[in-house]
Each structure stands twice: as structure tokens, then as C-alpha cells.
Image (tube, rainbow, N blue to C red):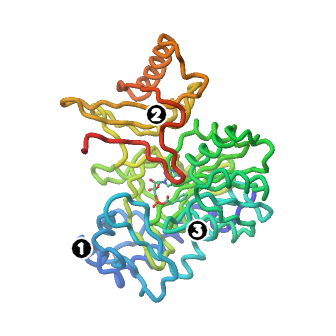
């Protein structure tokens, strides 16, 4: 199995930690000097960069949050003058002002190489034809994967998002071997192929690189069977660099975080305390090589755990589990923490359920109620009430046994839940209205 940057990706841990410390100290000096927000935060905490003498000292530093970015909108967190910035992206936030991030020429090079790492890990080579089905624009997904694939030397088709029938035609005619997009869009493509009578076995697809939103193992199996490819997960966020923070190798047992560029920590989202290795908690990331937009202990809100055991692929870099969702997307139903991905795992495993679902949360009196709306396949949309009842009960029981909390399942007509070309919106919370 090929490794894009074997020197770094397979570095012995001791050497890696030394490199991390050197890079961390350099980053801290730079942000303290150039970014007022960091200088103020460090001063408030009574810390100067010289106080960080070991990686364990990282804990002493204050966190950075989305609120800090909002307060410093648009360029206040940049550590270089704007004339050194060659690219600006922003996050896909749905409320308020977007988050603005910048890249120097070096940052673009670093980013391209990080993406090249996980694309290589997934099996992409210079012989591949890579169809990018992420939206080009302020979103980092399309440009990140585009530059990474070009760095490898693959042929890139910058298709963009949407235009599903055209995507399928291009895939057939240009013989795309790699598909890049969100996992939910992969399902939309599979559905459309089915309706168009296109047999995925007749396509040239080999590898799928999916990311940008949480998805379950059950969803992976479904995508792999329906699109006849090997589906891999990759993770990132605009604030840190975009895609290229972490990605799966072909062992598919967690996403390697590129630790020579980022230091991951897991914290208790309520107390902010650092948790021991293996614990589930909120991922916090510190960048080590970014010039324009360094982030110190950025709270991602993504819930996961880290596995430091050696991977069979030869990479020494720690692996993060598929995220369960965001701590701020987590639903609290009757006091129980519920992540949409847990429900997805159950649904996709039940025959007749489509992986298109929506969760509607409401409050009846003081009680939270969760309705799970699911689409069923055409042939299972029963006319007979008794059969429908039995099916509903089966699904409700299975979800209840996983979540430990009761839900109401409602069957909806095939194709009635809105499809998304980018990230899927799964939760409707009526409690806020
Ligand atoms: O989604 C960057 C990206 C693009 C990653 C394409 C991978 C592929 P944002 O729009 O800033 O950036 O959204 C970041 O999306 O904090 C997670 O909550 C979620 N997310 C991204 N990748 C994954 C993944 C891009 N593989 C936010 N699994 C993050 C679960 C993911 N969640």
C-alpha cells in the first residue's frame, strides 16, 4: 500500500513528538506576536509562549472557539498581512456571519500535500480519473480534493455538486475511477442510477472519498454495494484547513490524523478537561504548520475517540473514530444523549428502509418527543395496515434498544424527504421555534 509522505506518516512516535513540540513553539511565538486575540487570551491566562516546554504543557493554553472567530470577523485571526494571503474560504455555517479562513501560498502547498496523503491512503494514484462532486466556491471540500488529486497527478474532473444525471453521464463517458463528495450525495447518485437503469457494475468506479458530514458503517456498506467501489471516510473543517486533517487508509479502521501538522486532544465538552487516550469526547485541534490562519486548541465540537495502536498500513499516525456527530448537534431526548448517526446505523440495517431520514424533535408539555421519519422502498409501501404496523413496531423497538429511549417512527412516501447535493440536514428541532 502506497504512502504519499512516508517520512512523516510513518515517523517513530518519539521523533514525531519532538517535531510537534518544535513546531508548536514556533507557532505559539508567531501567534503571540501577530494575533491580538491570542496575545490577549494568553495574557489573561498568565502564559507566555516560553511556558510551553513540553507537549503536556499544551493543556495550560486557553481554548479557541467559534465565538473567537466571530468576534474577530473577518480578518482579525490572520497571522500574516492580507497581501500574503492567496486564498480565502469560509465555513458553511447556517447562522450569522460565516467563518473566514485564509491561506498563504505555502499553506496551499501544505494543504494539497495533506489531501494527497489521504487520497493515496484510500488507493488513488496518478492513473486515476477523479470526479469531484463537491460544490466549488467558499466551501473547502472541492478545492481541497481538487488540489490534492492534481498533486498526485491524477486527472481531475471539476464537476461540482448537483446536476445528478449529468454526473452519471460524465461518469460513464469519461470513465471516472474515483468519486469525491458527501456520503449522502453518493446515495442520491445510487438512487438516480437505479431509476435511470444504469448498472454501476458497468462503470469504472474503484474508490470513493466521502466526507464533510457524519455517516455510519451501515451507510458505508450500502454505498459500497450500490456503487461498486471502496468507500473511505475523510475528515476536516475549514477553521483547521478544510479536508486533509484526517483520512482512512485501506484498513478502514479509523482516520489517521496527520499529527506532524495537527495536535489532537480529546476533552470533556462540559468541563474542558483533557481525557485519557481512548475516551470519547470533543476533539480539539492545534495547527502546527499553518501560516495565515493558525489555530490553537480549537474546539471542533465533533465527538470522537483516538486510537494510538499501530495500524497495519504502516502509518504511525493516530486514528480517530468516525465521529458520532457534533456536540452541538447532539439531541438530548428525555435526558438521553442521541446522535443522528446512531439512528442511521439502525435504519440502514433494516431491509426496506432507505437511508433517507429526518428526525423531528418536539416538546409535548415538558416532555421531549422524537419522531423518526423514514422513507421505505416502493415495494414495501404496504397497503395492508397490519403489515405496516408490524414493520413500524420492529423499527421502533430496534431504535429504542440502541438509544435507550422511545421514539415514534413514521413512514413517508419514497422521495418525499428533501435530497441534498452537499451536506444533508437531518434534524428539525421544533422546540426552538
Ligand atoms: O466539511 C471540510 C471537509 C470537506 C471535510 C470535504 C471532508 C471533506 P466545514 O464545512 O467547515 O468543513 O465543516 C466541518 O463538518 O466540524 C464536522 O462536524 C463535519 N465533518 C467533516 N468531515 C466529516 C466526516 C468541511 N468525515 C464540519 N465525518 C466538521 C463526520 C464530518 N463529520
User: Of label 1 and label 2, which has the lower sequence position?
Assistant: 1
Determine whether 126 is above or below 275 in the image.
Answer: below
- Is 372 situated left or right of 164 in this image? left
Determine whether 373 is above or below 81 in the image.
Answer: above
Q: Quadrant of residue 1?
A: bottom right
Could you tell me how far apart the alpha carbons at marks 1 and 2 are, in whole angstroms?
45 Å
User: Of label 2 and label 3, which has the lower sequence position?
Assistant: 3
Q: Which residue is mark 1?
A: 46
Residue at horizontal 30 percent and vertical 30 percent from the top? 369
Q: What secondary structure is marked by label 1?
A: loop
Tags 3 and 1 touching, CB below 8 Å: no
Residue at horizontal 22 percent and vertical 73 percent from the top? 44
Q: What secondary structure is marked by label 2?
A: helix
Rendering coords of residue 318 (x, y %): 55, 55
User: Which of 364/286 is in front?
Assistant: 364
Could you tell me how far apart the alpha carbons at marks 2 and 3 are, in whole angstroms?
32 Å
Q: Which residue is mark 2?
A: 343
Amino acid at each position: 500500500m502506497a504512502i504519499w509522505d512516508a517520512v512523516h506518516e510513518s515517523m517513530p512516535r518519539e521523533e514525531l513528538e519532538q517535531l510537534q513540540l518544535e513546531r508548536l513553539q514556533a507557532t505559539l511565538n508567531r501567534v503571540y506576536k501577530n494575533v491580538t486575540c491570542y496575545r490577549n487570551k494568553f495574557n489573561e491566562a498568565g502564559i507566555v509562549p516560553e511556558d510551553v516546554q513540553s507537549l503536556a504543557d499544551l493543556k495550560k493554553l486557553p481554548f479557541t472557539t467559534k465565538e473567537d472567530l466571530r468576534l474577530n470577523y473577518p480578518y482579525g485571526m490572520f497571522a500574516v498581512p492580507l497581501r500574503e494571503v492567496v486564498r480565502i474560504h469560509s465555513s458553511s455555517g447556517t447562522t450569522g456571519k460565516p467563518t473566514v479562513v485564509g491561506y498563504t501560498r505555502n499553506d496551499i502547498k501544505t494543504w494539497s500535500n495533506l489531501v494527497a496523503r489521504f487520497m493515496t491512503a484510500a488507493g488513488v494514484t496518478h492513473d486515476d480519473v477523479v470526479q469531484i462532486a463537491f460544490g466549488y466556491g467558499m466551501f473547502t471540500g472541492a478545492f481541497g480534493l481538487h488540489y490534492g488529486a492534481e498533486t498526485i497527478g491524477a486527472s481531475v474532473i471539476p464537476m461540482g455538486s448537483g446536476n445528478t444525471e449529468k454526473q452519471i453521464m460524465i461518469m460513464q463517458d469519461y470513465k471516472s475511477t474515483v468519486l469525491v463528495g458527501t456520503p449522502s450525495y453518493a446515495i442520491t447518485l445510487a438512487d438516480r442510477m437505479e431509476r435511470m437503469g444504469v448498472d454501476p457494475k458497468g462503470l469504472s468506479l474503484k474508490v470513493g472519498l466521502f466526507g464533510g458530514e457524519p455517516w455510519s458503517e451501515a451507510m458505508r456498506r450500502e454505498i459500497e454495494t450500490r456503487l461498486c467501489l471502496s468507500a473511505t471516510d475523510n475528515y476536516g473543517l475549514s477553521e483547521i484547513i478544510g479536508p486533509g486533517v484526517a483520512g482512512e487508509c485501506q484498513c478502514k479502521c479509523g482516520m489517521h490524523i496527520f499529527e506532524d501538522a495537527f495536535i489532537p486532544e480529546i476533552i470533556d465538552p462540559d468541563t474542558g478537561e483533557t481525557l485519557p487516550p481512548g475516551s470519547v469526547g470533543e476533539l480539539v485541534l492545534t495547527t502546527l504548520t499553518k501560516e495565515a490562519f493558525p489555530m490553537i486548541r480549537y474546539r471542533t465540537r465533533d465527538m470522537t475517540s483516538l486510537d494510538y495502536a499501530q495500524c497495519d498500513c504502516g502509518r504511525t499516525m493516530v486514528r480517530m473514530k468516525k465521529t458520532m456527530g457534533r456536540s452541538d448537534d447532539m439531541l438530548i431526548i428525555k435526558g438521553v444523549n442521541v446522535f443522528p448517526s446512531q439512528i442511521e446505523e439502525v435504519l440502514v440495517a433494516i431491509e426496506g428502509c432507505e437511508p433517507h431520514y429526518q428526525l423531528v424533535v418536539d416538546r409535548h408539555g415538558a416532555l421531549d418527543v422524537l419522531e423518526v421519519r423514514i422513507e421505505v422502498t416502493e415495494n414495501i409501501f404496504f397497503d395492508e395496515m397490519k403489515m405496516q404496523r408490524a414493520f413500524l413496531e420492529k423499527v421502533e423497538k430496534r431504535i429504542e434498544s440502541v438509544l435507550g429511549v422511545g421514539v415514534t417512527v413514521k413512514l413517508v412516501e419514497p422521495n418525499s424527504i428533501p435530497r441534498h447535493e452537499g451536506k444533508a440536514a437531518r434534524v428539525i428541532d421544533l422546540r426552538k421555534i
